Image (cartoon, grey):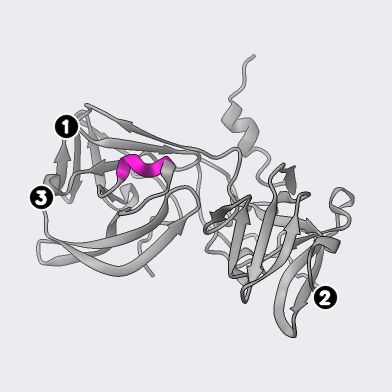
């Protein structure tokens, strides 16, 4: 009997996982290269959907100092993503310090500067000699000579940006937000399809927001709030003005969070997906 490959891959989410990479990986702090390795591993702790870099201890130009045994994050921590896991998952908004496998937290001392609990030594023989590092504790990460944004890039994660002739109508409480007969669809592993529309296809006033976010695959997004019936839908839409190469097809287009509005695709109303963005901005 054939099985779903997605089910096979997602079935591993509750486990500690790792994958070697052939890339040269570097980390920079205060203008100095403090990690330079050709032996990096991508490591996903249980329930983590985004990997961290793990490097051989000798490839880290700093001193590791034990802090304590890391306390395990509770089962209730995380976000519901029922299409991915029956248990809450830990996305990049959940701090590095929330560990879900046994091990020890370590301070990293580099050039007299201490990065508190920025390293983690997992109790796993397959990761012996390696420390997992907090991506956010360092100023820059590089894969070969390309800047690595937001978090390590996952070789099993991809995006596809495709033009479409399907009709997409975006609504909230029956009020039209936008309609397009020539949308650009962005398909991304483990995430809902995103419908990118031209600015002139949006039917409600949009106000620029100071909010930004960064994606390892798409680049930096800027956000929009929509005015609907006198109410403001804060940070309900976004735009990539200068996306990374893989997302060049959505440059300047506008997408809305499917989780917070209604999408009618070719006349059929789609269920709202459940993701970490379902509740909107905090």
Q: Main secondary structure of the magenta part?
A: helix
Quarter occupied by the C terminus: bottom left
Pick whichever, 189 or 261, lies toward us.
189
Please determine whether, in this image, residue 68 is positioned above or below residue 187.
below
Q: Is 92 left, or right, of 41 in this rendering?
A: left
Q: Position of residue 116 (x, y in %)?
A: 70, 79
How many angstroms separate mark 1 from mark 2 (CA)?
58 Å
Whichever of callouts 1 and 2 sits on the residue coming sooner in the sequence is 2
Residue 63: assigned label = 2
Residue drawn at point x = 57 percent, y = 64 percent? 94
**How many numbered tags mark residues here?**
3
Tell me where residue 37 sits by quadrant: bottom right
Part of the protein shown in magenta: 246-250
* Residue placed furthest toward the top: 1
Helix, strand or loop at mark 3: loop
Asked whether residue 175 appears in the rendered view, the answer is: no
Whichever of callouts 3 and 2 sits on the residue coming sooner in the sequence is 2
Q: Position of residue 130 (x, y in %)?
A: 83, 57
Asked whether residue 92 appears in the rendered view, the answer is: yes
Please determine whether, in this image, residue 238 is positioned above or below residue 104.
above
Whichever of callouts 1 and 3 sits on the residue coming sooner in the sequence is 1
Q: Position of residue 237 (x, y in %)?
A: 27, 55
Tag 1–tag 2 contact (CB < 8 Å): no
Please determine whether, in this image, residue 26 is positioned above or below residue 33.
above
Of badges 1 and 2, nearer the viewer stands 2
Q: Can you identify the residue that label 3 sits on?
A: 203
């Amino acid at each position: 009997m054939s099985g779903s490959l997605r089910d096979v891959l997602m079935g591993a989410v509750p486990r500690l996982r790792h994958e070697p990479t052939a890339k040269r990986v570097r980390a920079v702090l205060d203008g100095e290269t403090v990690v330079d390795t050709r032996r990096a591993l991508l490591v996903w702790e249980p329930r983590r959907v985004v990997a961290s870099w793990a490097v051989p201890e000798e490839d880290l130009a700093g001193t590791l100092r034990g802090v304590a045994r890391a306390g395990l994050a509770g089962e209730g921590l995380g976000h519901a993503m029922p299409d991915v896991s029956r248990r809450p998952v830990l996305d990049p908004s959940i701090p590095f310090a929330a560990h879900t496998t046994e091990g020890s937290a370590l301070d990293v001392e580099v050039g007299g500067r201490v990065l508190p609990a920025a390293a983690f030594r997992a109790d796993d023989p397959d990761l012996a000699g390696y420390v997992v590092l907090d991506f956010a504790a360092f100023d820059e990460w590089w894969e070969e000579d390309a800047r690595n944004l937001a978090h390590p890039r996952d070789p099993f994660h991809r995006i596809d940006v495709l033009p479409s002739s399907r009709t997409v109508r975006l609504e909230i409480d029956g009020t039209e937000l936008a309609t397009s007969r020539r949308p650009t669809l962005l398909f991304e592993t483990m995430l809902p399809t995103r419908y990118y529309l031209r600015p002139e296809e949006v039917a409600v006033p949009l106000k620029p927001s100071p909010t930004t976010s960064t994606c390892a695959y798409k680049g930096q997004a800027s956000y929009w709030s929509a005015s609907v019936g006198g109410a403001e839908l804060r940070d309900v839409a976004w735009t990539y003005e200068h996306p990374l190469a893989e997302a060049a097809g959505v440059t300047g287009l506008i997408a809305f969070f499917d989780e917070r509005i209604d999408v009618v695709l070719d006349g059929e109303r789609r269920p709202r997906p459940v993701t970490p963005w379902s509740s909107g901005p905090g």
